[in-house]
Amino acid sequence: MTASLPNPNFTIDLVQSMAQAGLDIVELGVPFSDPVADGAVIEKASLKAIKSGFKFEDIFDISAQISNQIDTYIMGYTNMFYKYGFENYIKKANSLKIKGSLIPDMPFEESKLYQNIQKKYNHKFIDFVAPTDSKQRIKKLVSTTSNFVYLVAYAGITGQAKQTNLSQTIKNIRDTTDTPIYLGFGVNEKNAKEKSQDVDGLIVGSAFVKHLLDDSLNFKEKLDIITNKTKTIKELICSKD
């Protein structure tokens, strides 16, 4: 969920409502001017939030209100964390019980530079695995992972309807770690049941965020639509038939 769109209080209300509808974990997206892993929907949402006055501290204000109610992760790009100071950020995140961070443009090798700081404050950087990663590369990526592995559904950006056979990638992960696998990129209510097969959870982004950009909807309508979609997806992936 893109944070602070249209404002921090709405994000808080929305996440709390989604949690009641079955959301297990929330990934707060930090608005950034050049979100290289994100598609057009989240990029537009990020720019709109920035123009509306988003400040990095808003992430902490939002997290303070929700992290006791739902596991909270921060997703953002290297530049903003570097500018704030990685240890300053991780220390602050730990104080607010933020579970971890996702930084898609930070190479695995670079993230290891901050391993000692992560251990010091018990904060986790979540590792990304793509279908283009070799078995040897996957073994390296998940060797120190915890919480969950973010499995990228295809090579590309978020929000696209692409199909990639992930069976071998999933097997390679399972052969290396018992850490849960969560699948992201291109997940929506139409394909959630199918994409949930063989993984432990789904990460949904653009399918929710697109409603925040719909100016024909008022705040309550946006909240209701996204909450109902959360409930639908949760029911789909938990149903046995």
Image (spheres, rainbow, N blue to C red):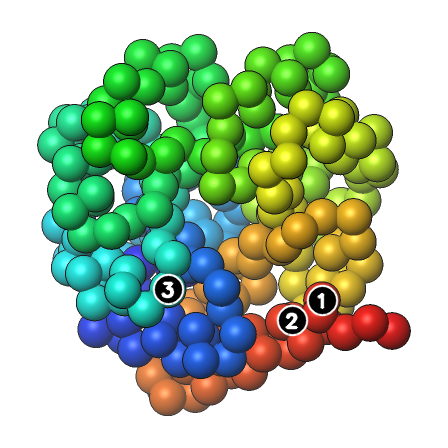
Find the distance from the CA under tag 1 to the CA under tag 3: 19 Å
The amino acid at mark 3 is Ile
The disc placed on residue 237 is 1
The amino acid at mark 1 is Ile
Q: Nearer the viewer, residue 37 or 200?
A: 200
Q: Is residue 72 left or right of residue 55?
A: right
The x, y position of residue 163, in whole percent, is 80, 44
Judged from the image, the secondary structure of the residue bearing numbered disc 2 is helix
| Residue marked by disc 2 | 233
Residue at x 21%, y 43% (from the top left corner): 94
The x, y position of residue 214, in whole percent, is 45, 74
The amino acid at mark 2 is Ile
Residues at circles 3 and 2 in contact by the CB criterion of under 8 Å: no
Callout in the foreground (1, 2): 1
Q: Is residue 165 left or right of residue 130?
A: right
Can the viewer see residue 118? yes
The x, y position of residue 142, in whole percent, is 57, 24
The disc placed on residue 19 is none
| Residue marked by disc 3 | 70
Residue at x 41%, y 38% (from the top left corner): 102
Question: What crowding class fits label 1: few (fewer than 14 Cα within 10 Å), some (14-19), or many (20 or more)?
Answer: many
Residues at circles 1 and 2 in contact by the CB criterion of under 8 Å: yes
Judged from the image, the secondary structure of the residue bearing numbered disc 3 is loop
Can the viewer see residue 150? no
Residue at x 18%, y 61% (from the top left corner): 64
Q: Earlier in the sequence, mark 3 or mark 2?
A: 3
